[in-house]
Image (cartoon, rainbow, N blue to C red):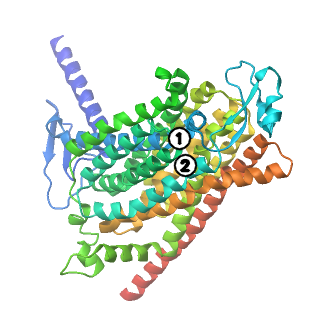
Amino acid sequence: MAEKLMLKRNYNLRQSRERLCDITAYFSCLLPAFESGFQCSRNDGPPSITFAAYVGSSKMDARTIPNAAVTRPTIYKIYVLFMLLMAYLLNQLDRYMLSIVTKPMAQEIHYGDQSCLANMTQRHHAVHCSNKTTEQDCASVPNNTCEWNYNGQGLQYELLAGPLFIVIYTLAGIPLGLWADVYNRKKLLGVAVVFWSVMTILMGLVNEYWQMAVLRFGLGIGEAGCTPFATSLIADYFATNHRALAIGLYNWGIYIGYSLSYAVGNFVVDANILGQGWRWTYYISGIPGLLIGSLIFITVMEPERQVKRDTTDAADLQTLLGHRESEPTCCQKAKFVCKVFFKPSVMLLCLAGSVRNAAGYVWAYNTQVYYESIGESRADIGRYMSWIPLAAGCVGVALGGFISDRVVKRVGPHARLGVLIISQIVAAPFVAGALFLSPPWAYISLIPGYVIGEMWIGITLAVLVEVVPTPLRTLGVAVYLFIISNIGGNMPLVVSPLQRLFVQKGITRVDALRDALYILYPGLYVLGAFLFLVTLLVLRRDMNRVQLSEYEEIS
């Protein structure tokens, strides 16, 4: 009997050891420790997990794992990625809060257009209010169903959403990218988070339109540093074969922050805390950034720059730029980056990313407006939009990075673009369904649209950091964001002219808005897919030319 118990104990011990090895090997594959090797032993006896010290440029094998004594690097990398995710979450939350609360804010500080709106104090408000074009017609609707008031739209809103934020956001990204290649990135990021959070809190105190314009300008300056600093840190914390997945997880911040803007913007306004409805949305959004920014500044360690340890890349910046004896100036760095971005494949990548980014901006700044125009209440919009972008979008960016990393192993780096093309074509009908279908199916149609269509973000950044030399990666990301944000971020300005054009043809305002969004939302998905296809063809041509030239040199 004792012998049987001993055999059973040894069997269970061996099974537990093997499960431990399998589980930890899986997680170490996702988030490998700093350039270190770990080995799991499956021998009989007590579980033995040994550590292979870092030697030279040896890489960690996906089959090896850390034990309790050496898990700190991996756990710390998870912590760093989490802090960067939180920063990006707040970045998006603070940015898009304007689009959610623009109507009650406009009605208090008086900006933008006026139109006939459903009277929200009445239980039987109707959709047909939006078809009344004059104040007299609006007042003639019985039972006070409609009211003539500020709708939060128009040129002044478009300026706040677009140029006043986007122009400084993109312009500031270039010098911030240059600073990140020289100065401490985690400190710069921590200061940036605190700065834009202060701007957000102050937005809750405005009483005039010009005050909001100045604060949106300041918000753009602070938020400009987030992605260049964060992606550069991620690139130095994670190996090449896991970089797209890490960037994809970081980009969860887009969808978490965007979804939270609907939850905070709709439910807090309805709660009307201390009679200051929309003002508290800015307070709640901004205060956490003070804590996150401080934690990044204090607790995140500046990693060793990959250019100093990766012998396969340019050995250092001086060698890359041809300045072996002196430190290259910012102008010299900028000239080299311009040379990289004037390559046809990189130009096309930026154009395709800009078009796809434009679709996202158009929808983000018109989602609330569109659903309110078809009769949805704040509670209805918040109930769906507070979780659909979060759940589906996060799955999409993680899935995109996961798939592209594995396709690259089998086919090559250019295969990432193939994933982009297929995902955008497949997603287009689903995002069109968000406009074609009636609620709740309009919301539900967004789920596959986000899961499939949002793969593009992490993949395009992964492609970019692979074609830009390592020493100038941060600046390259800043230039890329400058391009796609200027084109995409100002695209919402086209919505109103298109809507007016359709109205002049006898279409109702609601249908005119829907038609404009058909062109600028699913339509840009299809156009973006076509441009990614052209990018793929040009990139493959360039790769074939390089291989041919190398073959001729050998011959």
Categorize mark 1 by other alpha carbons within 10 Å: few (<14), some (14-19), many (20+).
Answer: many
Amino acid type at circle 1 is Leu
Which residue occupies the foreground of this view, 182 or 324? 182
Reading the chain from its start, which is encountered first: label 2 or label 1? 1
Q: Is residue 120 left or right of residue 101?
A: right
x, y percent for residue 513: 73, 45
Residue 30 visible in image? no
Categorize mark 2 by other alpha carbons within 10 Å: few (<14), some (14-19), many (20+).
Answer: many
Using the image, determine if residue 261 lies above or below residue 492: above
Using the image, determine if residue 205 lies above or below residue 38: above
x, y percent for residue 170: 45, 59
Q: CA distance from mark 2 to mark 1?
A: 7 Å
The residue sitting at 20% across, 39% down in the picture is: 71
The residue sitting at 21% across, 42% down in the picture is: 299
Picture disc at residue 98: 1
Quarter of the rendering containing residue 232: bottom left
Q: Give the residue number, with chain letter if any, for mark 2.
A: 161
Which residue occupies the foreground of this view, 300 or 402? 300
Q: Is residue 96 left or right of residue 253?
A: right
Quarter of the rendering containing residue 236: bottom left
Dots 2, 1 in contact, CB < 8 A: yes
Check the image and name the residue furthest to the right. 506
Which residue occupies the foreground of this view, 319 or 292? 292
x, y percent for residue 442: 68, 35
Task: Say what secondary structure mark 1 lies in.
Answer: helix
